[in-house]
């Protein structure tokens, strides 16, 4: 069986949060949803719409009944689900796609439980608007070119971020990470919910342990927190990253900056698109 891809929604999210991303992958013929895993308020896992796992690139949609549960609770629920997938469905490898808090859940589960042989091995990870360093940097105001040149290390680190740093070396080796970040044009450096600085800090967090890191920054209306997981441009990039051998992610583009001048920045791993 090839790697199963699990989609995890964010705080106050639900089936609608990842449905369009999953539909995009299915319509492109790249993957197929094989089950929905609903986790109740009490942590019980209910599997529905279960189909043959031995399809090309199977997808599991994860739903938390208590979509406002604390992060540490969701991390434990996610860990239990991964154990179940390996034990009951023989899942040996998985990819993770998370929006907002779902991104944190996936990263933290891998940081805390990498040594647990009961869970499948993580291969690829997509993080969309993840609040890795809380709301720090929310009120910054820098033009996009300057943002792209800024250090990924947060100047002011939350207690949670510092705690994650202590587990950095526990993160599984060989993982590829694709990070999607949003910024609303004309506002501060945030997507109306999450700061650009916080979302980008995952690169610093996992520096030295990732196989590679790619980043896509959306600006203007496309950069709104709750638009990123409904954006066809995001869908196409995520599909390309997860299920093609040589991902062809967008080149750097901004409305006000020459793309060629930016192309050498950050080892050609950053991508910005504006509409």
Image: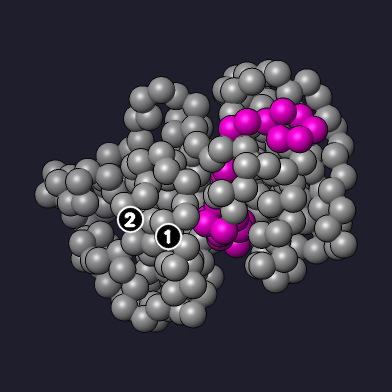
Residues in magenta, as a range: 86-112
Quadrant in the picture for residue 4:
top right
Count residues near mark 1 (Cα–Cα under 10 Å), then give few for <14, some for 14-19, many for 20+: many
Q: Position of residue 262 (x, y in %)?
A: 17, 50
Q: Nearer the viewer, mark 2 or mark 1?
A: 1
Count residues near mark 2 (Cα–Cα under 10 Å), then give few for <14, some for 14-19, many for 20+: some
Vertical order, 28 against 216 (above or below): above
Vertical order, 160 against 74 (above or below): below
Which residue lies at the image location 47% right of the left edge and 52% below the top edge? 171
For residue 106, say whether it is visible. no
The way the protein has been coloured in the rendering is one colour
Q: Position of residue 149 (x, y in %)?
A: 20, 62
Which residue lies at the image location 72% right of the left edge and 28% below the top edge? 90
- The residue that disc 2 covers is 207
Which residue lies at the image location 42% right of the left edge and 43% below the top edge? 173
Q: Are marks 2 and 1 in contact (CB under 8 Å)?
A: yes
């Amino acid at each position: 069986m090839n790697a199963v891809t699990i989609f995890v929604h964010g705080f106050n999210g639900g089936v609608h949060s990842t449905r369009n991303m999953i539909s995009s992958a299915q319509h492109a013929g790249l993957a197929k949803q094989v089950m929905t895993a609903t986790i109740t308020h009490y942590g019980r896992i209910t599997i529905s719409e279960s189909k043959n796992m031995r399809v090309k690139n199977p997808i599991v949609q994860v739903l938390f009944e208590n979509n406002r549960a604390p992060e540490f609770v969701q991390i434990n629920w996610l860990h239990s689900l991964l154990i179940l997938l390996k034990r009951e469905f023989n899942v040996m490898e998985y990819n993770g796609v998370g929006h907002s808090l779902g991104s944190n859940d996936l990263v933290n589960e891998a940081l805390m439980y990498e040594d647990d042989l009961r869970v499948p091995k993580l291969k690829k990870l997509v993080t969309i608007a993840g609040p890795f360093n809380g709301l720090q940097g929310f009120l910054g105001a820098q033009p996009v070119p300057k943002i792209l040149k800024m250090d990924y290390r947060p100047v002011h680190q939350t207690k949670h971020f510092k705690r994650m740093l202590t587990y950095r070396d526990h993160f599984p080796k060989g993982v590829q990470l694709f990070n999607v970040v949003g910024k609303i044009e004309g506002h501060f450096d945030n997507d109306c919910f999450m700061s650009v600085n916080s979302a980008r800090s995952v690169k610093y967090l996992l520096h030295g342990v990732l196989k590679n890191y790619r980043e896509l920054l959306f600006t203007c209306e496309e950069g709104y927190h709750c638009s990123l997981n409904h954006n066809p441009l995001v869908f196409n990039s995520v599909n390309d990253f997860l299920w093609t051998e040589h991902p062809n992610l967008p080149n750097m583009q901004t409305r006000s900056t020459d793309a060629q001048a930016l192309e050498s920045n950050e080892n050609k791993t950053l991508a910005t698109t504006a509409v």
